[in-house]
């Protein structure tokens, strides 16, 4: 498909189809089961109906877009891992050795790996996409992470990665990340866009002692004080305290929504990206599915701000899109039950007594 601009993507995004949702709700109430007995599966299926604009939303393909980039703020000692790990993990993704690679292979999910701005050199490989926004962001305790031009470049690249995935048949598009130091950037974004304090949005990341966590909170506070990102301007927030990969993932949310595909969020990093996308276009919320509840503290604030309820709670905080990929079979199951289960009339099964007071709708 032809590339589209950020502005074109935003203009294309409208609310999910309300009539398709109503028809799906009606069908759910006629299926051979007590209303609401499939719990969240029913709610997800109705959401899919609205996204795909049909009461029988069938899922064809699945893709996970893993964007990787480095962060200058690692110079402040916010992580116990060396920056070189970002590039090394990109190689690991490409070789199929990472957790998201294993899960994608197991569950039939296409993996799309993006160098959004890794500091180290990565060998060219056919399956690697390069954005070229820069070799890591600047240290956000000293000034903006990137320029406005770089921020828009990342968003536009993410939009078109989602357009590509949708064009190749992916109806579920997951957002995954890799970047040493990126929980610090995500914490700053979350604090800015949720109105919570850095202490509420900053968590362990790759593993912090209580003293190290206190230092990380201080780093986020300094970054916000130095840059003063404008919560009413998501491009300003991304440029001042974000990351290249976070910008790409925000673009993925926008592009997936523009293509009327379900965007499956992973954890804290993709959640912070979704906050940016939602601020740019509130209608994107209709297309988001939260895969799991991360063990990262700030993720709770992100989910609350977006009004999303995760499907899984496994104590995960890996990133990479691993939680999003793991949730995809559940989303496919929701679709299959709505589309393939028989209604009471079709199966010749007696429905509940029509004279009884109807149960409260499980979709409200």
Image (spheres, rainbow, N blue to C red):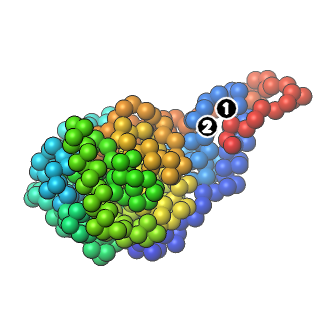
Q: Residues within 10 Å of mark 1 (few under 14, many from 20)?
A: some
Residue under pointer 2: 42
Question: Residue drawn at (54%, 49%), measured in percent from left and top?
Answer: 307
Residue 357 location (% of width, % of height): 85, 30
Residue 247: in sight, yes or no? Answer: yes
Residue 259 location (% of width, % of height): 49, 61
Reply above or below: 31 against 350. below
- Snapshot quadrant of residue 103: top left
Residue 212 location (% of width, % of height): 21, 43
Q: Residues within 10 Å of mark 2 (few under 14, many from 20)?
A: many
Reply above or below: 203 against 263. above
- Snapshot quadrant of residue 24: top right
Q: Secondary structure at mark 2?
A: helix
Reply above or below: 34 against 87. above
Residue under pointer 1: 36
Q: Is residue 241 left or right of residue 336?
A: left
Q: Is residue 161 left or right of residue 31?
A: left
Question: Residue drawn at (45%, 57%), measured in percent from left and top?
Answer: 195
Question: Residue drawn at (68%, 37%), measured in percent from left and top?
Answer: 362
Separation of marks 1 and 2 at Cα, in angstroms: 7 Å
């Amino acid at each position: 498909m032809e590339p589209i601009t950020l502005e074109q993507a935003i203009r294309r995004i409208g609310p999910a189809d309300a009539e398709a949702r109503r028809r799906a709700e009606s069908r759910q109430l006629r299926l051979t089961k007590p209303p609401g007995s499939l719990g969240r599966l029913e709610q997800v299926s109705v959401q899919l109906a609205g996204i795909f604009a049909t009461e029988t939303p069938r899922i064809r393909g699945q893709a996970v877009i893993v964007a990787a980039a480095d962060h200058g703020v690692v110079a402040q000692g916010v992580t116990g891992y060396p920056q070189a790990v970002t590039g090394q993990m990109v190689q690991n993704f490409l070789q199929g050795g990472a957790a998201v690679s294993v899960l994608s292979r197991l569950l039939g999910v296409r993996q799309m790996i993006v160098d959004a701005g890794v500091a180290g050199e990565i060998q060219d490989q056919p399956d690697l996409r390069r954005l070229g926004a820069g070799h890591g962001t600047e240290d956000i305790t000293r000034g903006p992470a990137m320029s406005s031009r770089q921020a828009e470049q990342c968003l536009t690249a993410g939009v078109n990665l989602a357009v590509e995935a949708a064009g190749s048949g992916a109806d579920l598009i997951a957002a995954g990340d890799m970047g040493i130091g990126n929980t610090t950037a995500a914490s700053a974004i979350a604090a800015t866009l949720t109105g919570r304090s850095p202490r509420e949005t900053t968590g362990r990341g790759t593993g912090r002692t209580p003293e190290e966590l206190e230092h990380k909170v201080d780093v986020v506070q300094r970054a916000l004080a130095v840059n003063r990102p404008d919560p009413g301007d998501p491009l300003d927030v991304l440029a001042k305290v974000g990351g290249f990969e976070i910008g790409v993932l925000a673009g993925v949310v926008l592009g997936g929504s523009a293509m009327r595909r379900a965007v499956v969020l992973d954890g804290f990093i993709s959640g912070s990206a979704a906050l940016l996308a939602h601020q740019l276009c509130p209608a994107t919320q209709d297309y988001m599915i939260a895969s799991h509840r991360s063990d990262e503290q700030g993720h709770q604030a992100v989910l609350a701000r977006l009004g999303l309820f995760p499907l899984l709670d496994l104590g995960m905080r890996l990133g990479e899109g691993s939680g999003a990929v793991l949730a995809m079979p559940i989303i496919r199951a929701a679709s299959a039950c709505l589309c393939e289960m028989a209604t009471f009339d079709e199966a010749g099964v007696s429905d509940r007594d029509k004279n009884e007071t109807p149960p409260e709708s499980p979709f409200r």
